[in-house]
Image (cartoon, grey):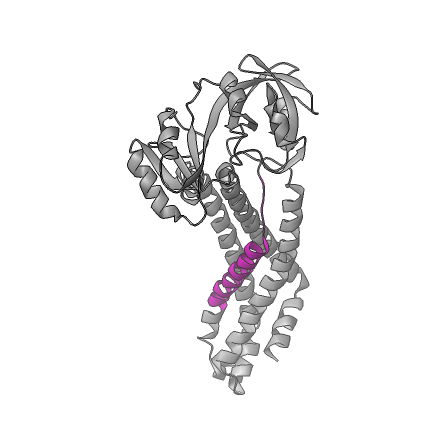
């Protein structure tokens, strides 16, 4: 019965009900987009690490993220090779350089040089060409997302990187970068031509553990033989890069504040509607109280009104947010809304509804049943 009363109270004023739904939908969509961007940023900022297939990263001391680092001398590679439990060691170059578009003008890029003799740190989600094609002199691979930005459109297009010729040998899909300086994949030897790195040196030394070796123990052994570097698991380095770009730069904080603002807007709009509706029907609530309805019964009516508004608003908002995320799938700033994220958003909407109902419920707690007999 309380559900039916709640529903009739809402639809009795259809204009107010629709306006409330619009407010709730706006608030939830804002929360969803902010949360989706935050998830997208967390994936993008650590993508280079999480797709490298390495167990351990040896990085220059003080490195804060995977996109920016100093260089390590060749001896770091030799030290790692001598450690028991190491199966594969690979040199990895990650450097900012200049890309000259065929049509003129330049663009900052990040050269990602990997050792093709290992299965570590190469391009992922290759949709055109193959990793083997990068062995050719000057061959590079970029993501389709940045093709227009870099002035290329197909395999075979020729460009200049740091004044040296290069040729597009393939394309990836989804290899985003947080800095908006596109990743350009090539082999270690090709990367030497386009950067200031000397043969043998590297930005990072990647390690693959032998089967059955405890990763944490191997990290400790590598750290002991290379005290001038920071040795950490791939997950730890991914988390470090993610935390740097999202929180140290303030990008994540801004998104969280935006989502919080959406929640506040939703609570205020819904609370105002429920309070106004309660005041208009205060006599009816007093009558119910006079004939024996307890505070729990009356509070349930208000709470269910809030949940109905929140539920309908959330359903509409989830569809809108999913469409926006789908349309943004090929944009530089990905909006990722997994089923788990949508579930969390639903729980947030429920909490928002409950908070909104508190103002009206507080009014009902002061109701006087005898007022109907005056």
The magenta stretch spans which residues?
A: 334-360
Residue 157 in view of the camera: yes
Q: From what the image shows, is residue 231 above or below residue 270? A: above
The front one of 202 and 182 is 202
Q: Residue at x 53, y 75 (%)?
A: 300
Q: Is residue 354 magenta?
A: yes
- Residue 118: horizontal and vertical position, in percent? 52, 34
* Horizontal relation, residue 145 to residue 82: left or right: right
Name the dominant secondary structure of the magenta segment.
helix
Classify 88 as above or below 360.
Answer: above
| Left or right of 319 on screen, residue 275 | left
Q: Is residue 340 left or right of residue 169?
A: left
Give the residue at x 54% y 43%. 40
Residue at image position (36%, 41%) is 84
Which quarter of the rendered picture does the N terminus lie within? bottom right
Q: Is residue 170 magenta?
A: no
- Residue at 64 percent of width and 41 percent of height: 329
Q: Looking at the rendering, which quadrant does residue 19 occupy?
A: bottom right
Where residue 371 sits in the image (x, y, percent)?
49, 81
Q: Foreground residue, 88 or 185?
A: 88
């Amino acid at each position: 019965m309380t559900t039916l009363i709640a529903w009739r109270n809402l639809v009795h004023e259809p204009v107010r009900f629709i306006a409330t739904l619009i407010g709730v939908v706006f608030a939830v969509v804002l929360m969803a987009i902010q949360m989706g961007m935050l998830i997208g940023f967390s994936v993008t900022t650590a993508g280079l690490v999480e797709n490298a297939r390495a167990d351990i990263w040896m990085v220059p001391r003080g490195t804060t993220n995977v996109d920016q680092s100093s260089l390590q001398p060749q001896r770091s590679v030799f030290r790692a090779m001598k450690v028991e439990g190491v199966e594969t060691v690979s040199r990895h170059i990650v450097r900012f350089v200049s890309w000259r578009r065929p049509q003129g003008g330049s663009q900052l890029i990040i050269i990602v040089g990997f050792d093709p003799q290992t299965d570590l740190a190469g391009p992922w989600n290759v949709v055109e060409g193959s990793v083997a094609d990068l062995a050719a002199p000057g061959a590079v691979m970029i993501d389709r997302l940045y093709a227009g930005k870099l002035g290329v459109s197909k395999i075979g297009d020729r460009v200049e990187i740091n004044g040296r010729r290069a040729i597009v040998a393939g394309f990836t899909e989804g290899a985003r970068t947080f800095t908006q300086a596109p990743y350009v994949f090539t082999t270690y030897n090709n990367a030497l031509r386009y950067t200031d790195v000397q043969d043998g040196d590297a930005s990072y030394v990647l390690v693959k553990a032998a089967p059955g070796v405890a990763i944490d123990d191997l990290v400790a052994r590598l750290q002991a033989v290379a005290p001038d570097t920071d040795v950490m698991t791939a997950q730890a380095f991914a988390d470090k890069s993610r935390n740097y770009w999202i929180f140290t730069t303030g990008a994540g904080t801004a998104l969280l504040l935006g989502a919080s603002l959406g929640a506040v807007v939703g609570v205020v709009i819904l609370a105002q509607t429920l309070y106004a509706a309660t005041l208009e029907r205060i006599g009816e609530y007093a009558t119910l109280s006079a004939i024996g309805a307890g505070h729990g019964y009356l509070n349930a009516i208000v709470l269910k009104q809030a949940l109905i508004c929140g539920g309908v608003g959330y359903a509409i908002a989830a569809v809108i947010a999913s469409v926006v995320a789908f349309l943004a799938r090929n944009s530089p700033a990905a909006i990722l809304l997994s089923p788990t994220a949508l579930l969390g958003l639903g729980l947030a909407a429920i909490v928002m509804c409950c908070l909104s109902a508190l103002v009206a419920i507080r009014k009902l707690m002061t109701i006087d049943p005898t007022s109907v007999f005056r």
